[in-house]
Amino acid sequence: MNAKDKENMSEFALIQRYFKTLSEPAASVLLGIGDDCALLTPPVGCALAVSIDTQVEGVHFPHNAPAEQVGRRVACCALSDLAAMGAQPLWATLALTLPQVDSAWLEAFSRGLGAILKRFHTTLIGGDTTQGPLAITLQVHGSVAPDQALRRSGAQVGDVIYVTGCLGDGAAALAYLQGKFQPEDAACTYLTERFYAPEPQISAGHALAGVASSAIDISDGLLADLTHISEASGLGATIYIEALPISPLWCNQVEPTQAQHWALTGGDDYQLCFTLAPERQLPQSQAWQAYPIGVITQTPGIIILNHGQPVHINTGGYEHFR
Ligand code: ADP
Ligand code: MG
């Protein structure tokens, strides 16, 4: 195809060229991209975990963001929900709204999306392609034993609260990408990667399935997401600011209160926050980490302590925190 033919590409040709290639053969897929529906066989005895995530240009990622990075981000953010449920990824469907057919953009987007899907053994089994302002919706499907799925509602008083990695990276990255924070070079590279490819914590979720009492992925900020756990469990929580893992790559380049604020309230970190009964052994693995940051309590609400002293955090809109 020459360049002009590509830009005039039919919807059918576009799907064949950029998305059929992301459809890996899998025993669970009887029929993939190309018919009115995909035909699938879920693993015997497992529940299907299903989640859908939309990313709109200018809302979830900057205008003119590199297409490969957009593809990676879409896949990472969607797969994070499967991680939070303790599910193993199986399939994905893609609803793509494009302003025009731009073959260079599609090529790079497909490459980025495909790299992440492949790494997590997720095969693309269908989708929809329409014209309009750039928006990308990815639905992901995974499998989990029904009695082992990690819900938000299972936390108990005395459970230890953990997170799987650094907090505040998403907010620091957004400030950097918006030109509001100019960190040193090493931090720029790190934050750009954390924004566009926040590692879905699939290994952690899998190891914690049937072990942790509750879990959520941190997409809206630790306080907001931990509140989902505490409210769903009918309990409260205390967290220790000094225990929050914050990356040394950028942490010392802002005021300590700014770093803590980003770690507590910033979105887009995609670490897991989970709770574990104190008598249960934390699964050990080289593949992921766990940092204890607090404890589940009886009284509803979240108390934040800084070396034992209560602090009030202005959460900007989330009113039910204390
Ligand atoms: P229908 O009109 O029956 O919905 P389409 O013409 O929209 O079918 O799609 C044809 C096939 O291509 C279907 O199997 C659909 O799942 C797949 N498809 C369409 N768009 C995409 C996309 N962006 N990514 C992956 N598969 C897609
Ligand atoms: Mg049809």
Image (tube, rainbow, N blue to C red):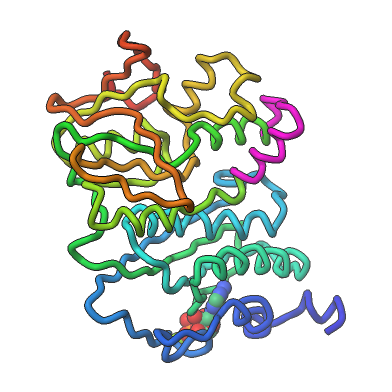
Q: Residue at x 31, y 53 (%)?
A: 208
Image quadrant where one finds the N terminus = bottom right
Is 138 situated above or below 46? above
Depth order, front residue of 116/285: 285
Q: Position of residue 293 (x, y in %)?
A: 35, 29
Question: Magenta segment: does it hold 117?
Answer: no
Q: Position of residue 17 (x, y in %)?
A: 68, 81
Is 109 situated above or below 22? above
Q: Please state if 64 lies on the left or on the right of 28 as rendered.
A: right
Residue stretch rendered in magenta on the structure: 178-194
Q: Position of residue 76 (x, y in %)?
A: 52, 56
Depth order, front residue of 293/56: 293
Depth order, front residue of 102/32: 32
Q: Residue at x 45, y 59 (%)?
A: 79
Depth order, front residue of 72/9: 72
Image quadrant where one finds the C terminus = top left
Q: Please state if 102 lies on the left or on the right of 281 as rendered.
A: right
Q: Position of residue 57 (x, y in %)?
A: 61, 50
Question: Magenta segment: does it hold 179?
Answer: yes
Is 244 situated above or below 304? below
Q: Residue at x 53, y 60 (%)?
A: 75
Q: How many marks?
A: 0
